[in-house]
Image (cartoon, helix red, strand yellow):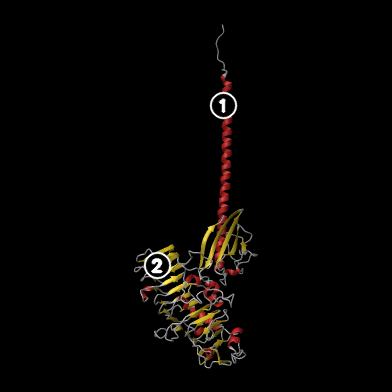
């Protein structure tokens, strides 16, 4: 008989194999998970590196953009047209620390403008290009491309230099329509800049209208701006800011009710800093390098004026300091010789004919009241006509050419250091030396361009068709007249739009003076008016002249376009 005993069952070997298999499975799962985690870690690292490089590339592009703004803002001649072509670009390294070299001109495509090399982080490239249909002197496109270890980001924006030519009206003091006789009507058609308050109250006709081109390349709605440094007051009446207005910028507050006629597309509190020209400094500069011959007599400054005597020219003796544009006969004709002629014989050597002298153009300004087409003729726009005293207009005038007349209003100032801010009457459209103390029998006279769409259409008032345009006799130079006035101005005009000023710019009064531009009756002003203060009359209308910066005389352009002008960044966007 066998005795029963224990021995391992057959299932033991299978269980051991199963355990080994399960261990292998676990190991494989762990390996897969580990590999996945490692791959994820590598992917996350790669993504983080890519994002980091992309962010650094964006910062590099921003560095290039900011450096471009800084360099362009300080461009010595403030004229970007020599920078902006279809291909001008420049590259710099050390995007982490863009320090311009002290002696590097902008732009220099072949030279780095950073002091550190080699580049520790990345590079940026900046291209400066023109904008089709806009004056490149003050409007350009900037593209900045940042590159860091293969990552690239691109920023593009428009840069615009704000100038007085962007506004049909600029006033240092408040503009108050309640001071206007006839119910407070006042109409501005275009852009305006007011350093003080705008009190826009009174009749329904008071308003700012977006119905004028800023550039002839524009299409409606136009890009007009209204800047008010302080407050807008619309407490009474039913004034209009609309059509709608593209931008209204109010640094202070809006008081009173805002009627349904207050209709801006954009409204903010971002107001450009003031940039009104320094009238005294510009008067001093004009006295230093005038375009016409001057002379001293008894401690005062006088014109050298060559007047027609029927058979030849003779220098007036004595020659008063005022420029008087009046008369109707040939012996009222005179011209101002250039400063390069012989002071002892300034009127000698000229042809004994008004027409021959006019055709020869060897003068700076000619007044020929017998010519039916244009009585006032400018012949040089690079240097100003300097008037020691004032300008008196004694008849309706048409002018041709481009020129700047600086009205010193201080004949006793025979050296630049003696020129100070003046407030007396300096520019008078009434031939009235007392500037506005006489009315009625002293009507105002107009000054307008020789060529205009209204010519031959008396009574036509079509503001959209009136702008600075090239005329037939000066194909590269539209008719534009500019007055820089160290003192006050006065106008007593009352006529339809086509009998008023055309292509006319006036800068009236210096800061710190009490100078005003006084308007007695209805005035139609086509051009630019920059004034310390305005004395408003009945229903004046101000019409913006498109592209005026392009057409201004060279000397005035230097006044308006300066490195100190505010720079605006528009349409900032990332391309890719």
Instruction: Using the rendered view, name the quadrant where residue 444 is placed.
Output: bottom left
Query: Is disc 1 surrounded by few (<14), some (14 to 19) or many (20+) residues within 10 Å?
Result: few
Q: Position of residue 366 (x, y in %)?
A: 55, 85
Alpha-carbon distance for marks 2 and 1?
91 Å
Give 217 or 70, whichever is nearer the viewer: 217
Give the residue pinned by disc 1: 19
Q: Position of residue 104 (x, y in %)?
A: 61, 68
Dot 2: within a 10 Å radius of its alpha carbon, few (fewer than 14), some, or many (20 or more) residues? many
Q: Image height check: is 58 above or below 285?
A: above
The circle on residue 240 is 2
Residue 500 visible in this rendered orientation of the protein = no
Furthest-front residue in view? 457
Q: Nearer the N terminus, badge 2 or badge 1?
A: 1
Q: Which mark is residue 78?
A: none
Instruction: Look at the numbered disc 1 and give the secondary structure of its residue.
Output: helix
Residue at (57% x, 72% y) in the render: 77
User: Taking 235 as reference, is 248 left or right?
Assistant: right
């Amino acid at each position: 008989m066998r005795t029963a005993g224990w021995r391992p069952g057959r299932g033991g070997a299978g269980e051991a194999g199963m355990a080994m298999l399960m261990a292998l499975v676990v190991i494989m799962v762990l390996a897969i998970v580990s590999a996945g985690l490692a791959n994820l870690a590598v992917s996350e690292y790669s993504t983080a590196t890519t994002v980091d490089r992309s962010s650094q590339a964006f910062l590099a592009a921003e560095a290039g953009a900011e450096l471009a703004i800084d360099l362009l803002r300080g461009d010595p001649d403030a004229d970007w047209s020599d920078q902006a072509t279809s291909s001008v670009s420049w590259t710099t390294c050390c995007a982490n620390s863009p320090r311009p070299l002290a002696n590097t001109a902008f732009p220099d495509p072949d030279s780095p403008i950073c002091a550190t090399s080699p580049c520790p982080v990345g590079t940026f490239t900046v291209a400066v290009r023109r904008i089709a249909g806009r004056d490149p002197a003050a409007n350009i496109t900037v593209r900045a491309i940042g590159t860091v270890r293969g990552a690239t980001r691109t920023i593009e924006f428009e840069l615009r230099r704000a100038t007085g030519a962007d506004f049909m009206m600029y006033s240092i003091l408040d503009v108050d329509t309640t001071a206007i006789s006839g119910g407070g009507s006042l109409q501005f058609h275009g852009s305006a800049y007011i350093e003080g308050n705008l009190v826009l109250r009174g009749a329904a006709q008071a308003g700012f209208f977006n119905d004028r081109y800023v550039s002839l390349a524009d299409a409606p709605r136009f890009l007009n701006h209204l800047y008010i440094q302080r407050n807008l007051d619309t407490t009474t009446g039913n004034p209009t800011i609309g059509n709608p207005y593209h931008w209204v910028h109010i640094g202070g507050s809006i008081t009173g009710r805002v009627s349904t006629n207050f209709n801006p597309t954009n409204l903010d509190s971002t107001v450009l800093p003031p940039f009104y020209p320094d009238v005294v400094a510009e008067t001093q500069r004009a006295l230093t390098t005038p375009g016409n011959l001057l002379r001293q007599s008894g401690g005062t400054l006088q014109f050298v004026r060559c007047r027609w005597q029927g058979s030849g020219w003779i220098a007036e003796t004595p020659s008063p300091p005022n420029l008087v544009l009046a008369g109707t006969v040939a012996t009222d004709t005179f011209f101002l010789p250039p400063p390069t002629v012989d002071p002892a014989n300034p009127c000698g050597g000229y042809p004994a004919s008004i027409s021959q002298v006019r055709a020869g153009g060897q003068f700076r300004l000619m007044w020929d009241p017998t010519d039916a087409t244009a009585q006032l003729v400018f012949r040089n726009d690079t240097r100003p006509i300097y008037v020691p005293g004032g300008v008196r207009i004694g008849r309706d005038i048409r002018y041709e050419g481009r020129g700047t007349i600086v009205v010193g209003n201080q004949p006793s100032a025979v050296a630049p250091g003696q020129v100070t801010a003046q407030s007396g009457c300096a520019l008078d459209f009434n031939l009235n030396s007392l500037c506005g103390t006489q009315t009625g029998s002293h009507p105002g006279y107009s000054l307008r361009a020789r060529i205009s769409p209204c010519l031959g259409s008396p009574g036509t008032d079509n503001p959209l068709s009136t702008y600075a345009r090239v005329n037939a006799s000066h194909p590269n130079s539209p008719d534009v007249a500019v007055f820089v006035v160290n003192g006050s101005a006065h106008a007593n005009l009352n006529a339809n739009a086509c009998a008023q000023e055309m292509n006319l710019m006036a800068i009236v009064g210096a800061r710190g003076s009490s100078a005003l531009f006084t308007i007695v009756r209805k005035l139609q002003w086509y051009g630019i008016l920059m004034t310390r203060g305005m004395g408003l009359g009945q229903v004046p209308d101000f019409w913006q002249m498109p592209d005026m910066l392009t057409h201004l005389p060279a000397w005035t352009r230097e006044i308006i376009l300066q490195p100190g002008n505010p720079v605006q960044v528009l349409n900032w966007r990332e391309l890719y």
